[in-house]
Image (cartoon, helix red, strand yellow):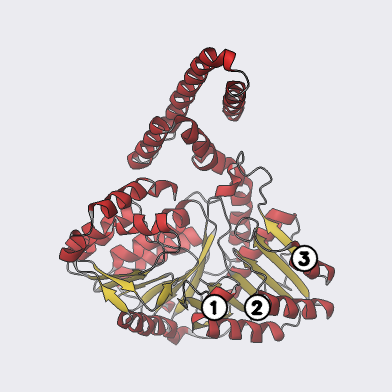
Amino acid sequence: MRNTLQVFIFLLLLSVLLFFTKDYWEGWLLGSLSILTTCSVIFIAFVISLENRRPAQTLTWLVVLGSFPLIGFFFYILFGQSYRKQRLFKKKAMLDEQMFLKFEGQRDFNIEQMKHIEEHQLPLLRLAHRLGKSPVSLATETKILTNGEATFSTIFAELEKANHHIHLEYYIVRHDDVGQRLKNILIEKAQKGIHVRFLYDAVGSWKLSKAYIQELRDAGVEMVPFSPVRLPFLNNKINFRNHRKIIVIDGTVGFVGGLNIGDEYLGKNEYFGFWRDTHLWIRGEAVRTLQLIFLQDWYYMTGETLLTLNYLSPTLIPNSEKGGIQLISGGPDQEWEVIKHLFFAMIVSAKKSIWIASPYFIPDEDIFEALKVAALSGIDVRILAPKRPDKKIVFYASRSYFPELLEAGVKIHEYRKGFLHSKIIIVDGELASIGTANMDMRSFHLNFEVNAFLYHTESTKTLVADFLNDLNDSDPIDYETFKKRRLATRVVESICRLLSPLL
């Protein structure tokens, strides 16, 4: 199938090239191009049908191919090939599963230790254990870091304490004040003989200067780009990005959450102003899971295995009275849409409330229906979204979902103080998820993500308090008023929503 697609690409490019060379051949070339394009559309439509996608996804691709045949063809090559995703990451998926079962499978899933878990919450824990391949840790401390100042000050303080190794994995790294401070610390540590490994996404960090990378390498820091793309317009690897934000220090302390490395996360961007975000500090047993996620990503890119006691022996902290934590990764390398399934399970487990904060709210059909049913059932469903956009297509696509949600009784609030970038779900004030995954289809289906799931922890209480504070800095959307928005706005929202499966 791959060779057939390459033939179609070659023929299309050849036809377009000939089309612009000689007017003499105009009639013949136009006819040939039309035939080739039609064959391409029919071929791809056939392939999509065989993949048994959701009807909405299939219809979207067919509309795009029918309306814009040539452009749609290349979009499909880049973004639409499910079989290509499976082939790209099949080996990684197999190795990751083997390693997680080997190291995390040694810890039993003992539900009796979870003293505060209610009967109706048990299916969520069983699902998380099965999909995440690691049990809930009761020997871990966590702390919520609210916004950039608390996050970066804590990160830099912990980096200064490193004695053996520092592992970093980020989607965006910028060469600005925050990036410069991070670089200086890493160089200092590397020069002292500490192992520093830095995995950065090749597309998310494409603006990162070569001088920045080289300076770190010269000091002994191992800088490795994740999934570099050499021919971005003819290679759909560009679509599968590493959206994780991970730091592991000496295998004992870790960080995960919504903040990348950049000044905007401290509110220094003039357009966004105040940046509202959330990160998580972790110490203890659960750091081993975070370490395994990093080490497997590192092995995928470098072939270097580091699965030794030096990296996988975190400090154990008895903490059963304060609840548990579970670190779970999701990505295109996995058989199941792990993060999406866990979000769905959290929503349907709710008895009292579902609170969601997400900068990019583009739910798939399952999540969308679950939220509406929950609200119609009398559950307090609240969604916190940005008032100002950073990605306009995503912003308008998000707002296209608002009318149905509002009609069902969902309360939607727009954060007005600055830009909301927190990625939070809180259920019944007892269970929570915090991490890198947005409530959108890209996080569900395409990106490599990692989230921490918190069960009856003190950190969950902090998230509840922060969410209530954020509501005070937000404006509720009135359903009747929202229905009266301009026709042009609704048209834009509908067009953007049509692209939702592709975003």
Do tag 1 and tag 2 residues touch (Cβ < 8 Å)?
Answer: yes
Q: Looking at the image, tell me whether mark 2 or mark 3 is earlier in sequence order.
A: 2
How far is mark 2 from mark 3, CA to CA?
Answer: 15 Å
Residue receiving disc 1: 268
Q: In this view, does 76 lie above or below 491?
A: above
Percent x, y of residue 197: 73, 68
On screen, residue 248 versus residue 328, left or right, reads right
Q: Which of 280 and 305 is in front in this view?
A: 280
Q: Nearer the viewer, residue 99 or 210?
A: 210
Residue wearing tag 3: 211
Residue type at mark 3 is: Ala
Disc 1 crowd, CA 10 A, few/some/many (<14, 14-19, 20+): few
Residue hosting label 2: 177
Q: Among all residues in the image, which is located at the extreme front? A: 23
Label 2 SS: helix
- Secondary element at tag 3: helix
For the question of whether residue 161 can be seen, the reply is no
Residue 228 percent coordinates (x, y): 67, 51
The quadrant the N terminus occupies is: top right
Q: Picture quarter containing residue 106?
A: bottom right
Q: Which residue is drawn at 77% across and 65% down?
A: 211
Which circle's residue, 3 or 1, is located before the other in the chain?
3
Marks 3 and 1, Cα distance to the nearest angstrom? 23 Å
From what the image shows, is residue 441 above or below residue 8? below
Mark 3 crowd level (few <14, some 14–19, many ≥20, 10 Å Cα)? few
Which residue is more in the foreground, 272 or 447? 272
